[in-house]
C-alpha cells in the first residue's frame, strides 16, 4: 500500500527522522509496505544522528548492539545496497589506553588484544609512553560516513514510495477503528506506528496513551581542534576509564570528547566550556598533540535504558506500537540492523492480520 496524498493512509508511520527512523522507513518500504517518515524538524537527522563520532566499534555497547551491528554489516559494506555513492566505511585503528594494567581486557572488549607500547606508538606516534601503562588494540573498527548513510537510507526509502514529512510533529496518537490516527502537522492514518523518536521516545509513548520505558538521555560533548601533525592515518584513541577519546577528522582537525555522560532532559543540548577544557587537559596529558584551540564544539544526546539494552520490540500493551529506541552510543552503527529487525517484526504482525 502506498501513501495516499489525500487522506495519508499508510501501513506504517515511522515517527522520528534520525538514522533509526530512516533505516526503519527504508527496510519497511523495501518490503512493499506503505510507509511515511514523520520528522518534527525541517531537516532529517539534526539531533543525535548529526552529532556522533561516526565510528563503528565491534563489541561496544553489549551483546544486543553487537548483534544489530553484525546484522547490518552487509548493508554497510555494500555501500547501502548500492544506494550510497561511495563506501560508507573506512578502516580505522583503535587503541584503548589504560592508566593501570588491563586486567580482563580481551574479555571485556571483544576483539581487543593487549599490545606493547612500541606497537601502539607505531600506530599513534603522538601518544606519550610515560603517561600510558597499557594499551589494547581493537580490530574491526571503521569510520562511518553518517551523512552518506542517512542520505542512502532516505534515497532508498523514497525510491520505494516512502513519503517524508518534515516540520511535522506527531502531537497526539490514538487508536481508532483498528488504525492509529497520528495528529500534528499532518493527519496520518496508519496500521502500525514505529517509535523512532530518539530522546523523545518516552514522550511519544505517553502521547499515544501508552506506558513509557524510562529512557535516560545522557549528554555527550564533542569538538574539533586543529593539530599540527598529519593525523589522517593515526589510530583513534579511547581512554579505557572513559575520561576522553580522540580520532582524526578531516582537514587537519582532531575530533575530541571528554566522553561525558550528563543526565539531561530531552532537547537541544549545548557544550559546556568546562567539559571541553577537561578533555583538552586529558588529551594533552596523554599525547604530544598540544591542543590549544577549538574550531567547533557541540553536544548531543545518547539515550539509554537502565540496563543499556536497545529497545526494538512491540509495546507490551499494544503490538501495533513498536519501539526502535534506546540506541545509546551505538545508534549509527546499529541502525541498519535495527531497521531490518523492525521490518521483520512488522511483517510478522501483518502476516497474522487479526492481531493488528
Ligand atoms: C557525541 C556523540 C557521539 C556518538 N558517537 C557515536 C558513534 O561513534 N557511533 C555510533 O554508532 N553512535 C554514536 N553516537 C550515538 C548515535 O548518535 C545515536 O545513537 C543515534 O544517532 C540515535 O539515532 P536516533 O534516530 O534514535 O535519534 P535522533 O537522531 O535523535 O532522531 C530522533 C528524531 O525524532 C524526532 N522526533 C522526536 N519526537 C518527535 C515527534 N513527536 N514527532 C516527529 N518527530 C519527532 C527528533 O526531532 C529527531 O530528529 C554518538 C552520540 C553522540 C551524542
Image: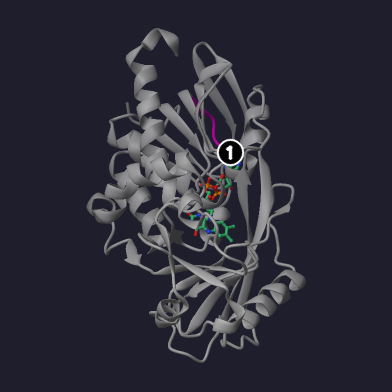
Say if 221 sits above or below 355 in the image: below
Q: Residue at x 68, y 51 (%)?
A: 218
Say if 300 sits above or below 94 in the image: above
In the image, farthest residue toward the right:
274
Location of mark 1 (residue) = 185
Residue 223 image-quadrant placement:
bottom right
Q: Nearer the viewer, residue 289 or 150?
A: 289
Question: Is 132 placed left or right of 8 in the picture?
Answer: right
Q: Nearer the viewer, residue 112 or 162?
A: 112
Residue count near mark 1 (Cα–Cα under 10 Å), binned few <14, some 14–19, many ≥20: some
Question: Which stretch is magenta?
Answer: 185-189
Q: Mostly what secondary structure, the magenta segment?
A: loop
* Residue 259, percent from left and from top: 63, 63
Say if 39 sits above or below 203 in the image: below
Q: Quadrant of the N terminus?
A: top left
Q: Secondary structure at mark 1?
A: loop
Q: Residue at x 77, y 72 (%)?
A: 274
Q: Quadrant of the C terminus?
A: top left
Amino acid at each position: 500500500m502506498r501513501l495516499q496524498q489525500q487522506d495519508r493512509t499508510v501501513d506504517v508511520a515511522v515517527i522520528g527522522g534520525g538514522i533509526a527512523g530512516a533505516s526503519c522507513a527504508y527496510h519497511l518500504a523495501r518490503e512493499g509496505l506503505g510507509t511515511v517518515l514523520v520528522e518534527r524538524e525541517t531537516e532529517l537527522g539534526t539531533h543525535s544522528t548529526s552529532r556522533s563520532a561516526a565510528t563503528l566499534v565491534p563489541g561496544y555497547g553489549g551483546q544486543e548492539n553487537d548483534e544489530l551491528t553484525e546484522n547490518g554489516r552487509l548493508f554497510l559494506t555494500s555501500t547501502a545496497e548500492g544506494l550510497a555513492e561511495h563506501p560508507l566505511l573506512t578502516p580505522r585503528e583503535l587503541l584503548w589506553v589504560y592508566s593501570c594494567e588491563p586486567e580482563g581486557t580481551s574479555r571485556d572488549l571483544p576483539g581487543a588484544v593487549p599490545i606493547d607500547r612500541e606497537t601502539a606508538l607505531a600506530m599513534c606516534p603522538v601518544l606519550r609512553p610515560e603517561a600510558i601503562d597499557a594499551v589494547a588494540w581493537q580490530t574491526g573498527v571503521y569510520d562511518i560516513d553518517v551523512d552518506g548513510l542517512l542520505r542512502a537510507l532516505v534515497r532508498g526509502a523514497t525510491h520505494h514510495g516512502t513519503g517524508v514529512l518534515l516540520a511535522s510533529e506527531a502531537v497526539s496518537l490514538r487508536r481508532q477503528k483498528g488504525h492509529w490516527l497520528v495528529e500534528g502537522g499532518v493527519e496520518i492514518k496508519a496500521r502500525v506506528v514505529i517509535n523512532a523518536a530518539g530522546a523523545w521516545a518516552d514522550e511519544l509513548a505517553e502521547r499515544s496513551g501508552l506506558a513509557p520505558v524510562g529512557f535516560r538521555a545522557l549528554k555527550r560533548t564533542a569538538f574539533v581542534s586543529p593539530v599540527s601533525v598529519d593525523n589522517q592515518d593515526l589510530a583513534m584513541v579511547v581512554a579505557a576509564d572513559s575520561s576522553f577519546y580522540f580520532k582524526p577528522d578531516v582537514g587537519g582537525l582532531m575530533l575530541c570528547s571528554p566522553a561525558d555522560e550528563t543526565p539531561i532532559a530531552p532537547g537541544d543540548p549545548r557544550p559546556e566550556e568546562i567539559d571541553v577544557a577537561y578533555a583538552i587537559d586529558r588529551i594533552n596529558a596523554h599525547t604530544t598533540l598540544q591542543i590549544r584551540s577549538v574550531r567547533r564544539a557541540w553536544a548531543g544526546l545518547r539515550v539509554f535504558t537502565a540496563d543499556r539494552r536497545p529497545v526494538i520490540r512491540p509495546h507490551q500493551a499494544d503490538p501495533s506500537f513498536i519501539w526502535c529506541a534506546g540506541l545509546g552510543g551505538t545508534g549509527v552503527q546499529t541502525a541498519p540492523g535495527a531497521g531490518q529487525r523492525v521490518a521483520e517484526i512488522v511483517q510478522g504482525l501483518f502476516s497474522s492480520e487479526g492481531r493488528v
